[in-house]
Amino acid sequence: MFSQVKDHYASLGIDVEQALTTLANTPISLHCWQGDDVGGFETGAGELSGGLAVTGNHPGKARSLDELRQDLDQVLKLLPGTHRLNLHAIYGDFQGQKVDRDAIETSHFQSWIDWAKSHGIGMDFNPSCFSHDKAGSGFTLSSPDAGIRDFWIEHCQRARSIAAEMGKQLGSPAVTNVWVPDGMKDNPADRQGYRQRLSDSLDTVFSEKLDLAHNIDAVECKLFGIGSESMVVGSHEFYMGYAMKNQTALCLDAGHFHPTESIADKISSVLMYVPHLLLHVSRGVRWDSDHVVLLDDPTQAIMQELVRCDALPRTSIGLDFFDASINRIAAWAIGTRAAQKALLLALLEPQDKLRAAELEGDYTTRLALLEQNKALPWSIVWEEFCQRQDTPGESQLLAEIKSYEASTLSQRS
């Protein structure tokens, strides 16, 4: 069956084997925070804040580093291809000691580096500028209080240093993504002041030049959040300008824009002016609710743009959702595999024929080819990919998840 499907795609000028190779070599960075509802493992940690909210109480949440790693081990068994781990600073191995955010060191993350090395995967990192008493005002790097700003500047600088060491030890650059929740519920009187302070703080954070072979800096925008409905300091326009001026990577989060706004249309423009793109593939529903990624039109459009722009070498793909209403292993596996399926569909497009028709002004053929492509037997190619990677196909996935739930998750109180 697969051989026949491959021949059919070949008749359209599509190299299925090349598509599978590209898919296998394109990692998705798995967000650690899906496993424990963005709790982290700091001693004396406060409630989740910064406009973030996790809904649901499905049993089996990871309660420790060991349980989180156990769950990640299971998820990696369910995913074809090679992947990465995206870690937030609140997930350090603090050994029961209280370590404030401005005092974190590589030693607190060495066990994570060792874990990643044992799995042959890379890591990415994030300073955690939320769920802390020094973020209680709603402002961190843009705070009018110099002491607050200095605290978070130190935290972000240490995060970059830790990430660089991760990249050095693992032989793959870590993307350090700076997102801050700074914003205001009602209309501000001085937007410019907050944005100037944020810009100045970021300049200090990034003042030390790090080896790009070890660390890639990224900044992440947002339209609005809970408690920042009227103004987010780090808007899309702010961060796009900052990334262009300073040649950092720009992070586009699919849940951080207006519900009717697609980040796919932004990809080709952004890549003309910034050196690297970081994507947080998520699914916002009416607000930044970070639902599990699906094989839906917005996700497919993102992956199509990456392939059509030949942007995969300059793009880091990560996930960012947190759903506690369903089995958390299932959320990881379904969401990651959906992103991979969308990428596979993009790789199986008849690019040469589509471009030729468009350049000739033959939009009829372009439309017909795109619609025909949707009906091609891509799922056979996906099942072949899963089989080659020794991972469950679609019909086996749920049984694997349910088995782990019965043997492991259900045993957690």
Image (spheres, rainbow, N blue to C red):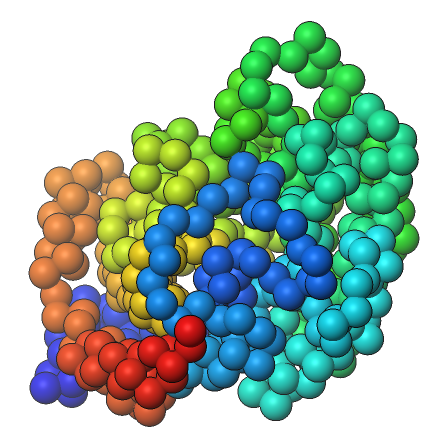
Q: Position of residue 131 (x, y in %)?
A: 64, 46
Q: Is residue 130 above or below residue 57?
A: above
Closer-to-camera residue (227/214): 227
Residue placed at 52% from the left, 75% from the top? Answer: 68
Q: Position of residue 111 (x, y in %)?
A: 70, 81
Closer-to-camera residue (137/295): 137
Residue placed at 63% from the left, 71% from the top? Answer: 123
The number of discs equals: 0
Q: Position of residue 403 (x, y in %)?
A: 27, 85
Residue placed at 60% from the left, 76% from the top? Answer: 65
Q: Is residue 63 above or below residue 283?
A: below
Closer-to-camera residue (191/82): 191
Q: Position of residue 102 (x, y in %)?
A: 84, 53
Q: Is residue 284 visible?
A: yes
Q: Is residue 317 visible?
A: no
To which quarter of the image does residue 241 belong? top right
Q: Is residue 74 above or below residue 126?
A: below
Residue placed at 57% from the left, 81% from the top? Answer: 66
Position of the C terminus by quadrant:
bottom left
